[in-house]
Amino acid sequence: MKKLKSPIALLPADFIIDKPFVSVVMAVKNEEKFIGRCLRSFEKQTYSVNKFEIVIASGSSDRTNEIIREFSEKGILNITLLANPSTLTADGLNIALKAARGEIICHFIGHAYPDADYIEGLLAGLKSSRMLMTAARVAPVSFSGRAVSRAIAAALASPFSVGWNAFSRKHSAVLKYSHWPLLPKFLTDEIGEVKHYLRGEDYEYFERIAAKGGRVFFNPQVKCYYYPRETLSEIFRVYYIMGKYRLIMFYDTGRCLNLRHLAPLLFILGIISSPLGGYLFPEVYLAFGILYLLLILTFSFKAANGRELKEVFLISWCFLLIHIANGLGLLYSILFEGLKRWKGKILAFAKKCNIIAFSHSSGFFA
């Protein structure tokens, strides 16, 4: 077993990257609208189809499995379809990783599709950088073509949504994490299984690699395309859960959180405190309100890229919903998950200070 080193670990000198066998692993659930486009794109890879396999763990109840079998029967792709009874993403990834036969693992998802040089480009990045992982730029695209769907895709491609990431970054970089990286199999064997979280389990997984010195070489010249949620209500739900589980992962691991993740929480606290804060410090709150309005309009016009004013408004609304949802999720996690986990320490402190409000009978921690 090749041990990882800190602070930054590189591929061992004896690890040869010369047309290795690659396992593309996916955990999918009800992707019947998208999986066909995904697999067709893998059929067109410049990397030889004889040098990679696709391992899919599916918890689907729609036509996803049927479509996958149709592609398998064509005989172009080497596809292994496995059942994921729990339907949880973490379980699906663990099932697929266990079955993978490749020297190299390529993480992917069912509602995305790669450029033709995707595998070849990622392998080239791994070889040239000698980093433990490499990843591509991810371009959000609208599936339906509706105005709201286009606005969501445009908002996610902007750094104003959730900061710089694979959706918005346009220059090569060495990162702690990026979406769906390619990495050697010995690394996944050493790190262990993907842990269960409703959102962000991949982030926690790769944070474990980063803690051991692993880094991602981000190559924006290699590209894939991602279909985000199609409605504002779905986007709100996704980012609320994402904010909630971001802090839960932090409670569990002491990692997976940085300053940019806390910005939506500060935004929400600013809104909640605005009646009192606006009364006591009107100039400060007015200044921050004007600044946020200017930022959201600036980034919305930039993301709209010359499209009609209606889409600028929709993109602004997307930004606002993402920030509110993420902030509310973080706040919920602090008020309920965090206090439950710190219950003993809080009660001990309350007892020491004779604070009656913190008591078992209050039911606050129930």
Image (tube, rainbow, N blue to C red):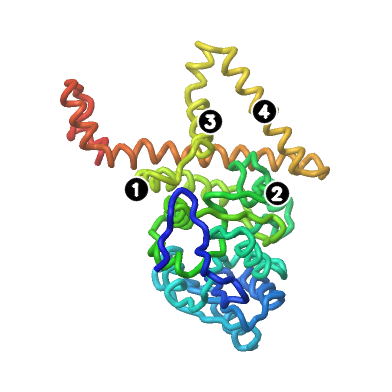
Determine the residue positioned at 45% across, 46% down.
Answer: 256
Is mark 3 in CB contact (under 8 Å) with mark 2? no
Residue pictured at 74% horizontal, 57% vertical? 145
Q: What percent of the width, then of the height, locates residue 65?
A: 54, 78
Above or below, 201 against 22 in this view is above
Q: Nearer the viewer, mark 1 or mark 4?
A: 1
Residue 159 is left or right of residue 97, and the answer is right
Q: For the residues marked 3 and 1, what is the alpha-carbon distance in whole angstroms? A: 25 Å
Give the label, 1 or 2, closer to the camera: 2
Comparing 12 with 179, the one in front is 12
Secondary structure type for disc 1: helix
Which residue position is annotated with label 2? 170
Residue assigned mark 1: 252
Task: Give the CA distance from mark 3 to mark 4.
Answer: 13 Å
Task: Compute the Cα span from label 1 to label 4.
Answer: 36 Å
Q: Secondary structure at mark 4?
A: helix
State the residue position of label 3. Answer: 267
- Write down the residue under mark 4: 293
Q: In the picture, which quadrant includes the C terminus? A: top left
Q: Name the residue type under label 1.
A: Asp
Q: Position of residue 316 (x, y in %)?
A: 68, 38
Q: Is residue 282 above or below residue 294?
A: above
